[in-house]
Amino acid sequence: MGVIQIPEKVHRIIGTLAAAGHEAYAVGGCVRDALLGRKPADWDITTSASPMEVKMLFPRTIDTGIHHGTVTVMIGRDGFEVTTYRVDGEYEDCRHPKEVQFTKSLIEDLKRRDFTINAMAYNEEHGLVDEFDGVGDLRRGIIRCVGNAGERFTEDALRMLRAVRFSAQLDFTLEEHTKAAIGELCGRLQKVSAERIQAELVKLLVSSHPERIRDAWETGITRIILPEFDACMACGQDNPHHIYSVGEHTIHALQEIDADKVLRLTVLLHDFGKPAVKTTDERGTDHFHSHQAVSQDLAEAILKRLKFDNDTIRQVKKLTYYHDYHPALTCAGVRKAMHRIGEELFPLYLKVQRADILAQNPVTQERKLADLAEMERLYKKVLKEQSCFTLKQLAVTGHDLMDAGIPAGPELGNILNHLLEAVIEDPQKNERERLIEQALEFYKG
Ligand code: ATP
Ligand code: MG
């Protein structure tokens, strides 16, 4: 196990609390990550001091979750969450337990935490406090509940999804009782708020082992939070392009794409429309006509249900719709695709295509990858030549056309788009005078 190096600012906070006669420790994720030799995302502090006492000791604090004992202490531009030792009551839908009780016992505070690897505390004076053998479980690579798994999941059902999320981030396995308890209690996830599920699902997806979503499926979690995924797992693809079910194909594709939220969500959702449109022909081959549009609609419905922000929804929808779009492999064809998909999303579309191909039948991969490489070459060429594929790059503006006598309105927009289409086909046409002439012809004709 790694040695824990407390950052200077955390050291100062703990020192200030100790000098005032309180106990204070770094706790939870930061201790776990430091022991694993990973860089902690943030350092949380747990203390015997009450929130009021914490606030009196530091000049700049924010009442982050004061009712639950959490005060953020600001040092320079960095904030550190300092939480009073507490025992939790039952959790409700929201982010925090319904009622909390403060305590003077560190061990009581550690007992309320979800997993043994998250229930360790450390300070320089007392060293590591590891009441539940978190270090042993870190060594074994195991996610195990603190105490009785069934009770812990009954208190807060989100912990079941967190278990899989941590297993995906750390490449750990679920301890047997913990896994069995999820199987029994996963139905309770129904009552957990969409916001909390979204946060854990995203962490699972953008982890280094997104294939662990298979554990979420095996234990029954996806059946509750993402039943559409279970439909994909049950949907075979007897088709020369594929060797996996829709769900297994999705899992393989997730492993082939960058750990980015929009990309991983797109890959997760890209084929969700397949189960609904599946047909089998007389030769026994499965087809999935226009699944892209159905996937797009499902992506929108699912992301809204999980309360994702509009910008994420917009990007994932568009990438889902175009994931299987194959433009003509010419500069004009690729410019047209770039116009449709948009400059911002086009490079992401290329990545989605690659991941999709890499999770298909290896026999057909070589040709598909060669086509994709050609599309990437043409894409770079179009960018380098700065040939026009957006209205922005067109040699005339709406104002030019209005000056030429075409009134403002929807018709003007249509004409601009016509001009753009012509220029995308033939960049030679991107010339001001000629475009104005052509616009007037359109307008009069
Ligand atoms: P990350 O690196 O993703 O932030 P983390 O372990 O810090 O991981 P957080 O969600 O930030 O996870 O929670 C901080 C700590 O609070 C956890 O390590 C755990 O001890 C405790 N904790 C968080 N959520 C729960 C929960 N739902 N039930 C019990 N304990 C929890
Ligand atoms: Mg954290």
Image (cartoon, grey):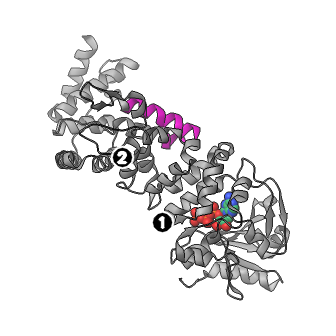
| Residue furthest to the bottom | 125
Tell me if residue 199 can be seen. yes
Q: Position of residue 244 (x, y in %)?
A: 33, 45
Q: Label 2 is placed on what type of residue?
A: His
Boundaries of the magenta span: 292-313
Q: Nearer the viewer, residue 329 or 135?
A: 135
224 relative to 111, above or below: above
Q: Is residue 165 left or right of residue 69?
A: left
Q: Earlier in the sequence, mark 1 or mark 2?
A: 1
Q: Which residue is mark 1?
A: 171
Look at the magenta stretch and give its main secondary structure. helix
Q: x, y (%) of residue 218?
A: 51, 50
SS for dot 1? loop
Residue 444 on the magenta segment: no
Residue occupying image coordinates x 52% and y 63% = 167
Measuring 33% from the left and 18% from the top, which residue is drawn there? 406
Residue 431 visible here: no
- Disc 2: which residue: 249
Helix, strand or loop at disc 2? helix
